[in-house]
Image (cartoon, rainbow, N blue to C red):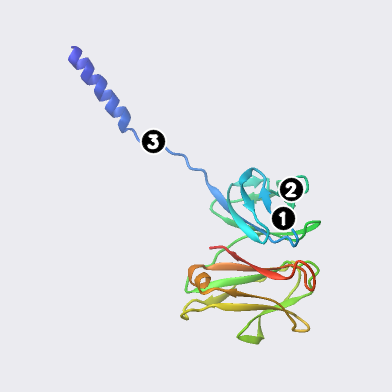
Amino acid sequence: MKHIFVLLLMLSICCSSCKKDNFTTTPLASLKIVNTVTGGTPAKLRGVFSTTINNNSNSNFGRLTGTQDLYVYPVADSLRPYYNNNQTISLDAQESYTLFLGGTPVAVTSLFVHENWAQRDNNIRIRFLNFSPGSLAVKVNLATSVDVPEFSDVAFGQLTEFKAYTKAVANSSYQFQVRNATTNVLIASFTMSVENVAAFNNATLVFRGVISGSPAPGISNVIHN
């Protein structure tokens, strides 16, 4: 009888150990925050203390779905946020969003975008955002075709549509030039490297800085995927 009891006990333990663990997954949304506040400082998203969003750079976050409190503040002054949505934005599961921050520390301009990525193919898609404070309209051309605008009359705060550029050409890179839309004077330039063209599918060129001022104009390359 004792042997039977021991056998039953061992069988019970084996059966318990064979039960599969049930894992519950939480659906998340993807959020990229771009900090191109001219003359700004590194920033943080409230509740995520381990990640710093450096100035003229960006960071990625996984966020819970539904209505979210998005509060982005400079690291030295959490009481004067760069962005506070006051829980007015709702995020959907498995969707991608980008929060662009520009302007100046005392007059931050924000742009929140629900992304819709095109199907991947043999192109990289690039768009342009004018976040240079006080900027007049600008145009963007390639260095190889100065008289052919890629993006025309882009006003401050305006985000263009994506435009496709082929990856098919060997060692392909693209040098973009930002010019005054009226006078054609060159303001800034940026080269999308061969490595970036080959490896990625969507990017935003953010024009920031002060034209004829400080900090000088420049372009931040924001890779999305």
Give me the residue at 56% from left, 71% from top. 125
Q: Amino acid at mark 1?
A: Thr
Please identify the quarter of the rendering in which residue 151 is found: bottom right
Q: Secondary structure at mark 3?
A: loop
Gap in angstroms between the C-alphas marked 3 and 1: 46 Å
Q: Which residue is mark 1?
A: 41
Work out how far the residue at label 3 is from the one at label 2, CA to CA, in angstroms: 45 Å
Residue visible at 53% across and 53% down?
94
Q: Residue visible at 49% across and 76% down?
A: 167
- For residue 44, above or below residue 156: above
Counting residues from the start of the chain, the first of labels 3 and 1 encountered is 3
**Residue at 77% of width from left, 75% of height from top?**
137
* Disc 2 to disc 1: CB gap under 8 Å: yes
Q: Which residue is mark 3?
A: 21
Q: Which sits in the foreground, 205 or 162?
A: 205
Q: Which residue is mark 2?
A: 76
Give the side of residue 152 with respect to residue 16, left or right.
Answer: right
Q: Amino acid at mark 3?
A: Asp
The answer to whether mark 3 and mark 1 are in CB contact below 8 A is no
Q: Earlier in the sequence, mark 3 or mark 2?
A: 3
**Secondary structure under the numbered disc 2 in the rendered image:** loop
Q: Which badge, 2 or 1, comes first in the chain's sequence?
A: 1
